[in-house]
Image: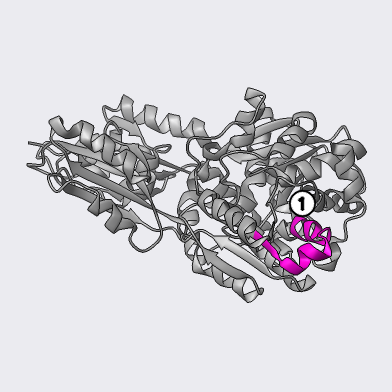
Amino acid sequence: MPEEILRRVLTVPVYDVAEQTPLEKAPLLSKRLQNQVWLKREDLQPVFSFKLRGAYNRMVHLSEEQKAAGVIAASAGNHAQGVALAASKMGIKATIVMPRTTPPIKVNAVRNLGGHVELHGDTYDEASAFAKKLSEEQRLTFVHPYDDLDVIAGQGTIALEMLRQHSHPFDVIFIAVGGGGLISGIASVIKQVSPQTRIIGVEPEDAACMTRALEAGERVVLDQVGIFADGVAVAQVGEIPFRIAQSCVDEMITVKTDEICAAVKDIFEDTRAIAEPAGAVALAGMKRFVEKYGVSGLEMAAIVSGANMNFDRLRHISERTELGEKREAIFAVTISEQPGSFKQFCELLGGRRAITEFNYRYSDPNSAVVFVGVRTEGGQAERQAIKTQLVEHGYAVEDMTDNEMAKLHLRYMVGGHAKGVHNELLYRFEFPERPGALLQFLTQMSEEWNISLFHYRNHGAAYGRVLVGVQVPPEQSADFEVYLKNLGYRYANEQDNPGYQLFLRPTE
């Protein structure tokens, strides 16, 4: 299979639409990581993503009859724009099915490139199923985003460029993985030309379909897929990419949302360009790799795979960057409710540590639980040292740095414990960003249940993050479980979350 991919890569005419993107040295990252770091700038393509390489290569192999009928694809962003641009260059009609949750900026980008947009469903899977249905009904050729030999070969042209642009083989190349088209294309080429180069695939922890598949020895379908890095939010890796990865990928690494945010900042500081979350995943993996193995002096490259970022997502990314860099720690600390206690607390932390956040609401005459952020420079070790210091001085401390509910919701809504609220259940939801999503949530809910807490945040993504408290009598708990299942939204039970217990749980 890799041999066939390389053969096709050598004859791909992608430069009819694509650019040979720069391979740039990242001096700040190189110094900080003590390795030579290079960034392959696929964010500089005409559609700000590598996807047009594979889309165009697939479409140049269409028969005249297929070209006359037109093509169809399903995508929430980058693949859609790649297909639309390729179709425009070739004079082919392109229909793109996009989820109704797709941000307007991406829908308009496809339309501006000449694509006909059909909005259907809330997820990629729903849009893809509808696109395949239209493909059969209207005899359109379906252009798959990753599970296709020609698409994979198109992405593999990136590897040829990197081999020409760098004077000697890389020690390690890091590549983000969604469906697997990008890594299978690059790995197929690199492993035949430079077999000593390690190929490392990188996935978000909550969208690790390739990692799970390689561990299991077969493709698996994830029950839930995290949506922060939407460009790699795939439930099942492609069949062809999986087979190639089994022989050509040396290791998989998973990264957290905060680490991806930190990598977005890293790319900006070295290039003044803003990568989308999926575009920064590979660099986040490189940083995790260096931390894990303690390597230095290596020649390493990361693919910056895209820059189709909604501007309003930057606020959320900037908030999480310091956590991703381990430059901020978050704690829930119980202090005495008396004058001077806050000053005493700050003096204990010391003048060299800046307090980045302090949230508090009076609720008890004897003690107060505060939500506090502290600037750190020593990573995990310093974070633990701060906690130990506080505990030794008699404070009750809960480390909230890795608590997703705390970072998404609690830090914006600390307001004290409610009184007289009984039988409250707390759940975190992801609402599709479309008209009617909230109404659907409320309409399906029993009129006997009362909403006692509600906090919503939009990060410019296809899904909004919602924290909801609902009063449900114990005898109706089974009915509530049925409601959650029928609703169809992703959710997590936060009843035992320490943040809820410390700051929000109702009191008698």
The quadrant where residue 495 appears: top left
Please say whether residue 108 is visible from this viewpoint.
yes
Could you tell me which secondary element the residue under label 1 belongs to? helix
Image-based side of 17 in relation to 410, left or right: right
Name the residue: 33% across, 39% down: 485
Residue type at numbered disc 1: Val
Residue picked out by circle 1: 151
Q: Is residue 470 above or below residue 475?
A: below
Q: Quadrant of residue 400?
A: top left
The local crowd at label 1, few if under 14, some if 14 to 19, many if 20 or more residues have their Cα within 10 Å, is many
The reply, left or right, for residue 271 in relation to residue 473 is: right
Q: Residue at x 38, y 27 (%)?
A: 388
Say which quadrant the C terminus sits in.
Answer: top left
Along the line of sight, which residue is nearer the eye, 65 or 235? 65
User: Which secondary structure class fits the magenta region best?
Assistant: helix
Name which residue lies at 83% across and 58% down.
Answer: 61
Residue at 85% across, 38% down: 2
What is the magenta range? Answer: 54-72
Q: Could you tell me residue 118's position as x and y percent?
A: 54, 66
Viewer can see residue 300: no
Q: Position of residue 415 (x, y in %)?
A: 20, 49
Q: Position of residue 505 (x, y in %)?
A: 19, 38
